[in-house]
Amino acid sequence: MTRRVLLIEDEPHIAEAIRYILVRDGWSVASHGEGGSALEVIRREVPDVVVLDVMLPGRSGYEILEEMRADPDLATLPVLVLSARGQSADRALAEGAGASRFIAKPFANAEIVAALRQMAGA
Amino acid sequence: MVPFNILVAVCLAYVCLLFLVAFAAERRAERGRAGWLRSPVIYTLSLSIYCTAWTFYGAVGYAARSGLEFVTIYLGPTLVLVGWWLVLRKLVRIGQAQRVTSIADLISSRYGKSNLLGVIVTVIAVVAATPYIALQLQSVTLSFGVFASGTPEGWALPDQSATALWVAGGLTLFTILFGTRNLDANERHHGVVMAIALEAVVKLVALLAVGVFVVWGVAGGIGDVIARIDASSIADWPLMPGRWIGLTFVSAAAILTLPRMFQVMVVENSDERHLATASWAFPLYLMLMSLFVLPITVVGLSVLPEGANPDLFVLTLPLAEGQGKLAMLAFLGGFSSATSMVIVAAIALATMVSNHIVTPLWLSLREGGARAPGDVRGLVLMSRRVSIAAILALGYGYYHMSGGSAALAAIGLISFVGVAQILPAMIGGIFWRGATGVGAAMGLVTGFLVWLYALYLPSFGSGGLLSEALLREGPGGIGWLRPQALFGVDGLDPLLHAIFWSMSLNTGIFVAGSLLTFPSPVERMQGLAFVNAFEHDAGARGWSRGGAEAEDLLTMSQGILGAEEAQRFFQAEAAAQGKAGFLPDTTPEFIERLERRLAGAVGTATAHAMIAQFAVGAAVSAQDLMAVASEAQQILEYSTQLEAKSEELARTARQLQEANEKLKDLSVQKDTFLSQISHELRTPMTSIRAFSEILMDPDLPGEMQQKYAEVIHDETIRLTRLLDDLLDLSVLENRKVQLSVKVANLHDLLNKAVQAASNTRPERAFTLHRDFPAEHMPVITDTDRLVQVFINLVSNARKYCDAERPELTIAARRRGGRIIVDFIDNGSGIPKASQRLIFEKFARLTDTARAGGAGLGLAICREIMANLGGTIAYLPGQGGAAFRVSLPVRPESAATAEAA
């Protein structure tokens, strides 16, 4: 059974890179590049893990995350938050909103893969 | 016989002696050893300036013409001095308490420090003194004349008028030297007082010497003289009770109101107790002065030839008897009488003129008012000197106009009646609290005018200042307005007539005016201080047994000290008196301690006034209230200063707060900016890192390698451009741009920009609308920078215009001294809410259609236009996105240089 990951990232190059490394690692990858409709996509796709960028057009990653945590169906879905802001304050903000993991950009590819494996396994 | 030259030399020597005496006295006083200078004897002798040349020479003339009536001139002052405790003592007390400098000051001060009253009194005093000074000139001139001719009949000087002028000039110089050498704070002149005391002795000795010579040298002793008097016509003069009463009254009034008498009696008084001595010593002096008047008169009348001027008997008798030295002494006596009167009168009048007329006028003419004290001193001294000269000039003028022929006594009485007009205001002022300034002014003016009309102007003789017809039939034939028969009162002696009408109208109007008007607060206070001069001693601040209630005092003290503090103080005081509770007996000691305690909180004057409210029998003096006012003023000033300071502090605090807000804003801006930059940098770096790692994978297919290497390349360029933009923006924002200004054709610049932007989304069809002829205009600016702005706008349109068939219209024109270029596309435009944000850094509105920009483009455009002296703005309501670039045809600095 392939593990399914939903990638919500507006930067096409970054989305492409992540998609490549995850597919290589054996994941099934769906991706979406906009914040406003992200929740619908999550509910539709029902992924095992979500990779969520913070700065999205339409709606910020934190808002999406908070709504997910408020929704019983999505409350426990593992979410990896990616942020171009790597300060500890940003990390705290992400965890407060209910992030399962937080990784700052730019990241090491292996770091993403390891994190997702762990989150999906748990 | 004494040669005229020697006479002049003796006069000068005498004057020098007076100077020495005055100088020595002043030196003594300065060294604080006034001692006997301030003795009652000196005070009494100084009062002798009452006896002028009029008395010295004129009494004999008076006796020769009107018998014993001359005695009234001595009777009035004697009554005033014998009854000194009634009026004089109060005047002196008030004068010292109020630091009065002249009679004008006294009246002005009493009626609410009204300068108008000061001016009125000054004018009356100066006008009234004029005949009097003329009289001194006349007597000195006459006596000179007698010596010059050597004959008893006198009149032998070639030009009597010229002699009088010389005398007036000499007296002016003498008075200025004497009276205005320096400016005394308290207007006291020890030197002058000493000199006139010496002169008093000289004139008494001279008159007594002449008298003794006449009685025992010419006549055959006392018995003979009495027999002669009985035989003479003097004994036959009927006593006229009306004139006696009138003259006694006028002379009594005059000694109180004559400016020079006020000067020596009140202003120069250093000790109230001297009055007690003067009250008997001065009448004694007057008695001695009048002792030999009758003998000299009768002997003169019988010995000297028919027609000899009796006004000069004192001089001509010794001369006729060949007693040159005695005549010289008599001359010096007369000279002393004249000079002492002129000096003191001129000093007193000059003080009034300068204090009430010149100085206020000068100060009001000067804008700004406040002057260095030294300047005012100089001004006051100068104005006094000029006043002295003017007063003597007036005296000379009167002498000249009246012809110098009138009898001495008649002239003197005119002056007396004039100054007596001040009496109602003065007496009313010190005895009647209801007297008001309006009443006083009305009374004074009325009395003065009646005096002028009924006595002064007619004194120049009919056909003088008043025509003969006016004197006889009244102005315009109105009988009841005849100067010497006002209101149809005919047949009265002109002098008595004038005294009656001037004094009764003056007093009546003064009383009526006072009853009908209300005094101002200051007037009320001053009235209280004057009328109750004895009840409340402003100098000593002690309280006699007050009727103050301890409870009232406690209540008041609680208001000032606070309840606890006040109760503790009262309890301690009660305990000290051996009483329990909070209410000690209100002994003077207790009240004094309480006052001191309160003074610590509210100031001495206020404390005194507050206690006074409760201590029965202690009136609050004007000075107390003035002191309160000044204290309150100080507190007010202090609090105003505090207020200013606290306002300043508040302002500083506000400024600091503003600066802090600005810093906070800046800090927030900086944080936002850094975080935005961080984001903008991290995003390409993330791609670069991720793809670099992917490229390290040996299994990566070839075509993927190619594609990912291209991504890395693009992202690197994006990073570089971002850094360039940031640096560019930083330079532009700091206005540190080196502009290279060139002349170019706007059309060429637009062509360049369109060309450069053509590689933005080149895959899209894009239509440009331009009006080439309109674009041909010269523009002087940094053309590279302007092109940069144009490129940005064109490529933004190419990037973001969301129309199906994107179009851009570029319209250029000149308006005024400016070039305006509009860029309008046919897209949906920028939402209203975002329009004001688009020129901010990183204000990229949407990420969907990004083409490598970091959101700095329009921010850079705005900064470029600002550097070029132009603007860039969004034009709302044009359908699509519309931007207007506007810039001066030539740079501002060049334009202004050309305009200049």
Image: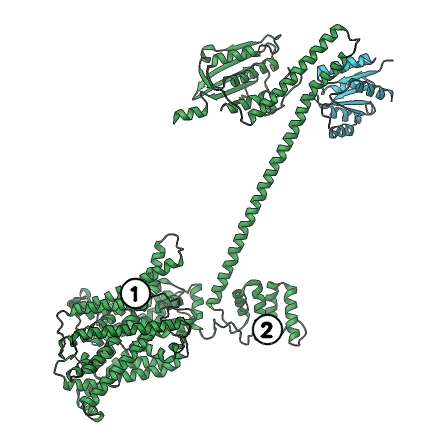
Chain colours: A cyan, B green
- Picture coordinates of residue B17, whole percent (x, y): 28, 74
User: What's the chain of the residue with tag 2?
Assistant: B
SS class, disc 2: helix
Q: Is any atom of residue B489 visible in this view?
A: no
B509 relative to B775 in the view: left or right: left
Which residue occupies the foreground of this view, A49 or B235?
Answer: A49
- Picture coordinates of residue B80, whole percent (x, y): 34, 79
- Picture coordinates of residue B717, whole percent (x, y): 65, 15
* Residue under label 2: B590
- Picture coordinates of residue B114, whole percent (x, y): 38, 63
SS class, disc 1: helix
Which residue occupies the foreground of this view, B469 or B31?
Answer: B31
Question: Label 2, label 1: how many angstroms apart (C-alpha)?
Answer: 51 Å
Give the quarter of the image for residue B500: bottom left
Give the residue at x 61% y 75%: B585
Q: Is any atom of residue A60 visible in this view?
A: yes
Whether B424 is drawn above or below B840: the answer is below
User: What's the chain of the residue with tag 1?
Assistant: B
* Residue under label 1: B123
Give the quarter of the image for residue B62: bottom left
Q: Marks 2 and 1: CB-CB under 8 Å? A: no
Residue placed furthest toward the bottom? B223
> Image quadrant for the N terminus of chain B?
bottom left
- Inspect the image, locate mark 1, and give the three-letter code of the amino acid beneath it: Val
Marked residue nearer the N-terminal end (2 or 1): 1
Residue placed furthest toward the top? B702
B130 relative to B625 in the view: left or right: left
B204 relative to B596 in the view: left or right: left
Asked if both marks, 2 and 1, belong to the same chain, the answer given is yes
- Inspect the image, locate mark 2, and give the three-letter code of the amino acid beneath it: Phe
